[in-house]
Amino acid sequence: MIKIYNTLTREKEMFVPLREGHVGMYVCGPTVYNYIHIGNARSTIAFDTIRRYFEYRGYQVDYISNFTDVDDKIIRAAKDRGISAPEVAAQFIKAFEEDTQALNVKPATMHPRVMDHMEDILSFIQALIEKGYAYESEGDVYYRTRKFEDYGQLSDQSIDELEIGASQRTGEEQHQKEDPLDFALWKKAKPGEISWDSPWGQGRPGWHIECSVMATKHLGDTIDIHGGGQDLEFPHHENEIAQSEAKTGKKFANYWMHNGYVTIGEDDQKMSKSLGNFITVHEMIQTVDPQVLRFFMATTQYRRPIRYSETTLKEAATNLQRLKNTFDNLKFRQKSAVETLTGDDTHLAELQQMEARFIEEMDDDFNAANGITVVYELAKWLNTYLEQATVSKEILLQGETLFAQWLSIFGILFTTDELVDEEVERLIEERTQARKNRDYARSDEIRDLLKEKGILLDDTPQGTRWRREA
């Protein structure tokens, strides 16, 4: 059984879905005013990996991740560039799709957008007003935070602690609130801003209301899992709970999951646009293999911070190449494998034991670090097996299936190289003949020539196999 660390209870809990065999996940998506940086990508990759593991375990996953396509940052970006807010949003939604596709992130079941849900948002806010949880003030609408008794439970803060922080806030909107803790559901439009008609005048939604609306609309009043970055715990997710449960009278999400930060520098500073210490995925994948970046991000347990550096990225590249070499070894030995061999039952049992260990590790709150350790052990086992004089097709098939499935959970897909053209095949054959003739000078000459083409040769007892240089 899968266990999930629930931020709300601060405990690991057995996962029990609302519908047997189904998982409803809502994960907060990007505000689309710029390219995503690798800190943003961490959340996208972490929850894609979690989704893939659920599917590996046989669940059908309804995965909803929104685009915030109207927001203060988008409006500022539009003004700076002299284009409309929808044009800014469209550009960076497209960029997000391209960048995440390069990272082998599966498209969400649905990517709802704020602008497409304006009537739902207005209806949701009106319901909160009618229930006494919200009020209009000078064209804005605010949520009465104190009226929701469990406010602060998710972030483990008391209302008194929150009040001290709120009392220190400044800004023109503070005088409009009944209480400093109250937060905006609807914002009155400023001159020149994009806006919509509402019962309270021209305006646009506050940030927090959108996710409550889209999550409940597409997954129901209660959802299985709500996820996002650790930085969204407060106030965004805290406010989502207050809004949603006030409107529906039901528990909003059964499990709350939050991924850790990506840190950078000697002081392990959180990577963020506001601190200016970020690296965009768009820039990085121009020079770094996207699979390496994906592997680097996906193989750390999602709640743990990831320290980004050139060194840690190179380590990931080295480890990924070792796994690729195992994949190539598997493909190479299939050509000479036999149907059955003595000892197959023992080898199959060993593979089954590794499979059980992998599931045990990943079932424990999606512990990718321990899970990938089992993958490394499988690779070592396969390489040892592949060095035998004869190998079994059944064992190779079983081993390759596990190897490919597990790597797929981490978003890694290896393919057979197709670069060996007739000339290279001819050179490899000529080198083999030169070695038989003890013409080692010609053999070395051909090896060097192929290396210049980026092709490395491995001489094995079963013949010469080639691979691309990493």
Image (tube, rainbow, N blue to C red):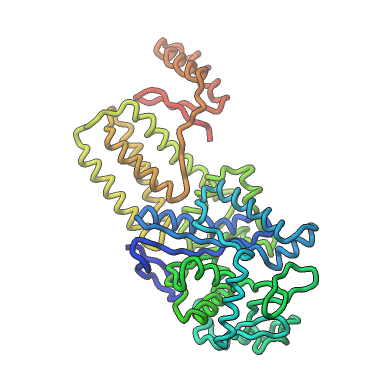
Q: How many marks?
A: 0
| Residue 267 in view (yes/no) | no
Please give left or right for residue 29 compared with residue 86 in the image: left
Q: Give the quarter of the figure containing the N terminus.
A: bottom left
* Closer to the camera in the image, 32 or 167: 32
Res 11 → quadrant: bottom left
Measured as percent of width and height from the top left, residue 78 is found at 75, 60
Which residue in the rendered view is the most extreme toward the top? Answer: 437
* Closer to the camera in the image, 294 or 66: 66
Res 390 → quadrant: top left
> Relative to residue 391, is residue 35 depicted above or below?
below
What residue is drawn where x is 44% and y is 77%? Answer: 251
* Closer to the camera in the image, 398 or 78: 78
What residue is drawn where x is 65% and y is 84%? Answer: 166
Please give left or right for residue 463 compared with residue 74 in the image: left
Measured as percent of width and height from the top left, residue 158 is found at 53, 85
What residue is drawn where x is 62% and y is 84%? Answer: 181
> Relative to residue 419, is residue 244 depicted above or below?
below
Measured as percent of width and height from the top left, residue 97 is found at 59, 51
Please give left or right for residue 173 compared with residue 56 in the image: right
> Relative to residue 107, is residue 23 depicted above or below?
below
Res 53 → quadrant: bottom left
| Residue 260 in view (yes/no) | yes
> Relative to residue 470, is residue 446 depicted above or below?
above
Please give left or right for residue 123 compared with residue 348 in the image: right
Measured as percent of width and height from the top left, residue 51 is found at 44, 57
